[in-house]
Structures are given as C-alpha cells and as structure tokens.
Image (tube, rainbow, N blue to C red):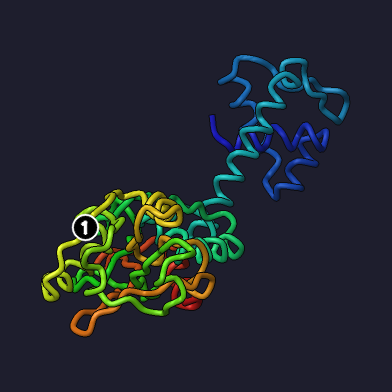
Amino acid sequence: MELRQLRYFAEVVETGSFLGASNRLDTAQPSLWRQVKSLEKELGVPLFERSGRRVKVSSAGLLLLPLTEQVLAGADKIKSLASEITRGRAGTVTIACAYPHLLRFLAPLIGGFHMERPDVHVAIQGLPGLPPIDRVLSGEADFVTSIPVADRRLQGHLLGQARIAVVTPDDHPWRNRSEVKVAELAGVSVLVGPDHSLTRRLLEPALRTEGVILDIMYESHDMASLVALARAGLGVAVVADDHLPGEPADHDWPVLCDDDHEMATPVWIYWAANRALSPPVQEFVRHVRNSV
C-alpha cells in the first residue's frame, strides 16, 4: 500500500470520477485507475461502484475514507514539519543550566526565541549547580551555562555577570551599604552555599588571603532558604546575586568585595564547536548573539 494510492482513492471520492481525479492530480487516467484497482486488490474490498460515467464510493470505501484522510493529513504534516526543521523553524533545543541562570539570564532569551520560533521546543535540564561541560561535548545537551571555560571544543557567548551579594535583615548595620569587605565577615554568623557552589568558589581564595574562617550558621544549596533565613535575622546570607529575584537593579543589597580577589564572575552559554549544529540550534545561537 502506497500513500499515492490512498491519495488517488480520496481524490476519486471527492471528484466523483477517475477523469476528474486525474485532471486534478495531473496524472494519466489509466495510471490512476490501475493504482486504485491495485489498492482494491490489496485491501480485498471494492472501493467504488460504477454509476454511468461517474463512480460512487462503496460502503467499504465509506468506512475506509476517514482513516485514509487521517493518514494523508499525517503524511502532509510530516512533510511540512520536516521542511520546518530544515529551515530551523521546528525541532528541539536542549539547554543544561544552573537554576539561577534560568531565572536571570535564560528566561528572557527563551521567551524571545519562542516568539520567533514557536514550533521549536526548548528542553531545559535544570541543576542546582553548574552543569558539566561534558553534556555539550557528548551531545546530551546543545547548550550549557557556566563560568568561563578555556576549551577549543566549545564556542560561547557572554550572558552577563554574577556578583556576590550580602543579604541582611532590614535593621542590620550593613543593610544600606553598597559594599561589604570580605574581612568584615570575621565573627559574623553566615548563611552560605556548599563547597561546590559558585559563591564558595569565589569566596574561599579571599578568605584564605584575609585569614578569615567563616562562622557558618547554616549551609544549603537552596539559596532561597538562605535569603529567607537572613531576612528573618538568623545571620547574613552570602549568595550569588543571580539567585535573587529580578535584575541586579531590582535589589539593593550590598555586594561583597575584596582588594585582591574578584567577587564576581562572567556567566557564559557554550555549545559544541566541532559538531554540526541542527538548524534549530543554529537559530538559537543567532538569537543569543543578537539579543545579548
């Protein structure tokens, strides 16, 4: 059974004659007639009954017609979707990212991309920490967000900066300051992320230089909990500001600073440099470069 035969069958039903169907399909009438007869033979039922110069669909044909139309519509949809995929207008883009990067950097990008390419599905692999770069190199993900990585197998684009903010209760002496020195954390109850968190990666070298040992009141990968506890007066939360809601301009928490160490890091989005990218992935790369 071929799609062509099903299409011939449906057209004969619609036009009421083999001649009408052959004219509409620009196909020789004898060829169309043979294909329909071949379909009848394969199905084992007559599809038409003759009525003068016209043909009338049989009872078996009437039962088979709705399914035939579904199959033809599905085939047309497959062809259309394949065409859209080729042009980058359909398919899937997979992004592995840390949860805060989704909130701060990716959500606006994905929203804008969806408006341009509504048929492209964006699959998000959210993680509490930075995703392994291997996810892109292995093909498990099309993109990852990360701090700067020197690897010739990757191409990337800068999304923005993540700084270290100090969240305090409203009545804390630091609340209205713009900066807090790392050395000032000595003797202060601190709420902070685990060792592998971005905050700790940036903070630990400065702590060693200053000779400061943190008095850790509470440690968690759930930065929202750290912020809530700090606001409630259980200490000061030292967190990357990409964990805070909104843009940096939307909050006025003091930022952590140090004379010898940078308390901020660029955040990049990376993709494979040595692998052919699907059209949807190419379109997302273009969107990122044009938007950021």
The residue tagged 1 is: 215
Q: Position of residue 96 (x, y in %)?
A: 35, 55
**Visible in this render: residue 143?**
no
- The picture quadrant where one finds residue 152 is bottom left
Residue at the (60%, 38%) spot, across then down: 74
Amino acid carrying label 1: it is: Asp
- The picture quadrant where one finds residue 52 is top right
Q: Position of residue 89 (x, y in %)?
A: 54, 60
Which is more toward the observer, 114 or 245? 245
Query: Which of the image's four quarters has the N terminus?
Result: top right
**In the rendered picture of this protein, how many numbered marks are placed on residues?**
1
Q: Is residue 91 above or below residue 69?
A: below
**Visible in this render: residue 173?**
yes
Which is more toward the observer, 86 or 174? 174
Q: Is residue 210 above or below residue 100?
A: below
Residue at the (81%, 22%) spot, across then down: 50
Specify whether 67 is left or right of 208.
right
Residue at the (75%, 41%) spot, across then down: 21
Q: Position of residue 155 (x, y in %)?
A: 29, 72
Q: Position of residue 265 (x, y in %)?
A: 29, 74
* Number of other residues with Cα within 10 Å of mark 1, as a class: few under 14, some 14 to 19, many 20 or more: some
Residue at the (58%, 41%) spot, across then down: 75
Which is more toward the observer, 282 or 1? 282
Which is more toward the observer, 71 or 256? 256
